[in-house]
Amino acid sequence: MVVLRKKFNTAFVLSLIYLTACSPKYLEPTDTIQMPELLDSNFRASDGTVLPMRIWNPPGKKKAVLIALHGFNDYSNFFDAPGNFLKTKGVLSYAYDQRGFAFTKTRGFWPGTSSYVNDFTEFVQLVKKRHGDLPLFVIGESMGGAITLLAMTRSNAPSVDGVILSAPAVWGRVSMPWYQRAALWLGVRLAPGMRLTGRGLKLTPSDNTEMLVALGRDPKVIKETRIDTIHGLVDLMDDALAVSAKFTKRALILYGKRDEIVPVAPTHFMISKLPPSEKNKQWVALYESGYHMLLRDLQAEIIWEDIAHWMQRPGEPLPSGAEKKGTALRLKLKNRDKVTY
């Protein structure tokens, strides 16, 4: 019994040491060393980090500028089809690869929420300086939507003419079951560097199978994710959900009813927390057949048309009429005494 107790005590102490030794590895940026700048095909942030950039330039007269921010494990190529479509509508689009994704220097590691928000703020300010005579809009998909939401609710938020959130990642801990929170808490302490895949989850991010197969073959798309990076993402989603009550910018929030990546509960929670909006200032567009990757679904051109219309014809109904279903949803959520899940 004494021997067993000693073995148990030794194992317990070793476990504590192991727990202390294992901690998330976040590659946060260094201090500011220069003014941020836009190069021909790159964005150089204020800490000197160079991030690849893509531009979709209309051949004729430019009517508006749109900055697109990609989602988790993705990169700027996510906006290739929408960017080419919007070119035909006179929209000049920009997108850059965020830190830790694609083939950036810190691929696979989480640099911290502030890093993403600061990069986005600097980038928007640079684009605005370059195209100050044109209306400027931003669109964030999934994780990019969470970053956009945070950036646009801060005191130093860049000045833009409108914000588009496509399936924003707002799945914070408040809407997670206890066992998922516990698993994340243990995982980031026991094995922060362990890499996980989405295999076996049986989730459908889009009905565009051809596009999904191409993503699976694309070496720039990350397929295995460190647990501490997932932890960082959840921290980001926590923060984005918390600030949604302070989000007052003119906005178009896109959501697919078949979204299996960001569950309906946290999305409804975010929508219910939005402050009362002036007429035509904040619209929720609900797409009955839409999945998480709305901008690349089989029905994506419907969303692209809505985006172009919303940017260039403020206050007019969307071609798809999706804002009517979104308005009905907001009214339904507003009439509840309390939104609980």
Image (cartoon, rainbow, N blue to C red):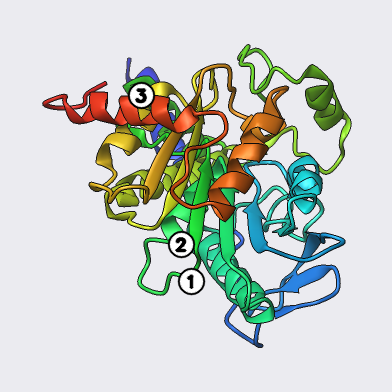
Q: Position of residue 299 (x, y in %)?
A: 68, 24
Q: With respect to residue 294, does 71 lie above or below? A: below
**Could you tell which of marks 3 and 2 lies nearer the N-terminus?**
2
**Could you tell which of marks 3 and 1 lies nearer the N-terminus?**
1
Label 3: state its secondary structure. Answer: helix
For the view shown, which residue lies furthest in the left direction? 337
Q: Quadrant of the C terminus?
A: top left
Label 2 sits on what residue type?
A: Ala
Q: Position of residue 137 (x, y in %)?
A: 57, 60
Label 1 sits on what residue type?
A: Pro
**Residue at 58%, 17% in the rendered image:** 289
Residue 152 visible in the picture? yes
Residue, disc 1: 158
Residue sitting nearer the eye, 13 or 317: 317
Judged left or right of residue 170, residue 79 is right
Label 3 sits on what residue type?
A: Ala
Q: Residues within 10 Å of mark 3 (few under 14, many from 20)?
A: some
Q: Position of residue 14 (x, y in %)?
A: 46, 38
Q: With respect to residue 2, does 103 lie above or below? A: below
Residue sitting nearer the eye, 6 or 16: 16
Indicate which disc residue 265 carries.
Answer: 3
- The alpha-carbon separation of the residues under discs 3 and 1 comes to 30 Å
Q: Are marks 3 and 1 in contact (CB under 8 Å)?
A: no
Residue sitting nearer the eye, 259 or 127: 127
